[in-house]
Image (cartoon, helix red, strand yellow):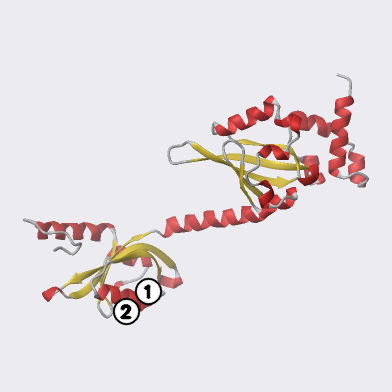
Amino acid sequence: MGMFGWVRGRGGARTERAIIAALSRSQSVVEFGLDGVVRSVNERFLAALGCRAEAVVGQPHSRFFPVDDAEHLWRALTRGEQVSGTYRVLGASGRDVWFQAVYIPLAGRGGRVSSVLLYACDISDERAAVVTREQRAEVVDRTQGVVEFSLDGMILDANDVFLGVTGYRLDEIVGKHHSIFVDQDESRSDAYIGFWRRLRSGLHEAGLYRRLAKGQVVVWIQATYNPIFDANGRPVKIVKYAAQMTAEALAVAPVTNEVADVLDLIDGASLRAGDLAMDAAIDAAFAEQRGAPR
């Protein structure tokens, strides 16, 4: 059997050596004794850590690999079991390097394990990118309302920020249609039907929206509706990011269409004086617009 458990045929030893050589050129390689002391390393591993060979060779495994259960790891390797996973390695100046790696026990004479080879790919950049995305997602979840919809507009999930804006509990809206947040007339309109048709087709929507919170309370939100695609590029759901608009923000927000027409009719003096809440002022503007001669 070869080091990877393959059955050797004619020329198998030469093939195995060629594979090992190819892996050594393309991946970081470390050889350990069964006592966990580093016997040798290749240049790729040293470059990843930013260290010289003399600072690594002769050092124990624990010096660079802070594994939670090192004893369990080395027991498994001594039994001849391969172990793989994602590992944090301590580089020069305390820098963390992340590897996707496999420990391979090597059998010596008599078939007993005599040393361990570590083959590893540096995934530090990829991991940093994942961490950055996760942190951004956490920031968004803390500061913006987030709602997930099915392609037909059914509510799948919502975060605490969105629930706070609308006054609903999660169990009150999951399984309901997005139309609970709009007037009945709007929910039957061609514009609303077209809105969801565009989202289902994979188009992005963004703007300032008048929505109904619990108890038919009017709220204004700046929102984006974002189709999420599967590996084949097909839309699978819609994620909405929303921020509630204050009176001050609403006064300077870039808006278009009906909203712009309505805002032009809002009495700015009333807003500044605080005599009317923003929602009441907007509703009054809608009423004035409906009553205005065409």
| Residue at the top extreme, as displayed | 294
Q: Is residue 140 above or below residue 153?
A: below
Residue 92: quarter of image: bottom left
Q: Can the viewer see residue 217 in this picture?
A: no
Residue at 24% from the left image edge and 61% from the top image edge: 24
Residue 276: quarter of image: top right
Identify residue for label 1: 64
Q: CA distance from mark 1 to mark 2?
A: 8 Å
Q: Which mark is residue 59?
A: 2
Q: Position of residue 2 (x, y in %)?
A: 15, 63
Q: Is residue 39 above or below residue 132?
A: below
Q: Secondary structure at mark 1?
A: helix
- Crowding at label 1, few (<14), some or many (≥20) Cα neighbours within 10 Å? some
Residue at 19% from the left image edge and 74% from the top image edge: 113
Q: Secondary structure at mark 2?
A: loop
Residue at 82% from the left image edge and 32% from the top image edge: 262
- Crowding at label 2, few (<14), some or many (≥20) Cα neighbours within 10 Å? some
Q: Is residue 209 above or below residue 24?
A: above
Image quadrant occupied by the N terminus? bottom left
Image quadrant occupied by the C terminus? top right
Q: Is residue 271 above or below residue 198?
A: below
- How many marks do you count on the picture? 2
Image-based side of 103 in relation to 69, left or right: left
Q: Position of residue 124 (x, y in %)?
A: 42, 60
* Circle 1/circle 2 CB separation < 8 Å: yes
Image-based side of 118 in relation to 198, left or right: left
Q: Which mark is residue 72?
A: none
Image-based side of 284 in relation to 126, left or right: right
What's the amino acid at mark 2? Gln
Q: Position of residue 236 (x, y in %)?
A: 51, 39
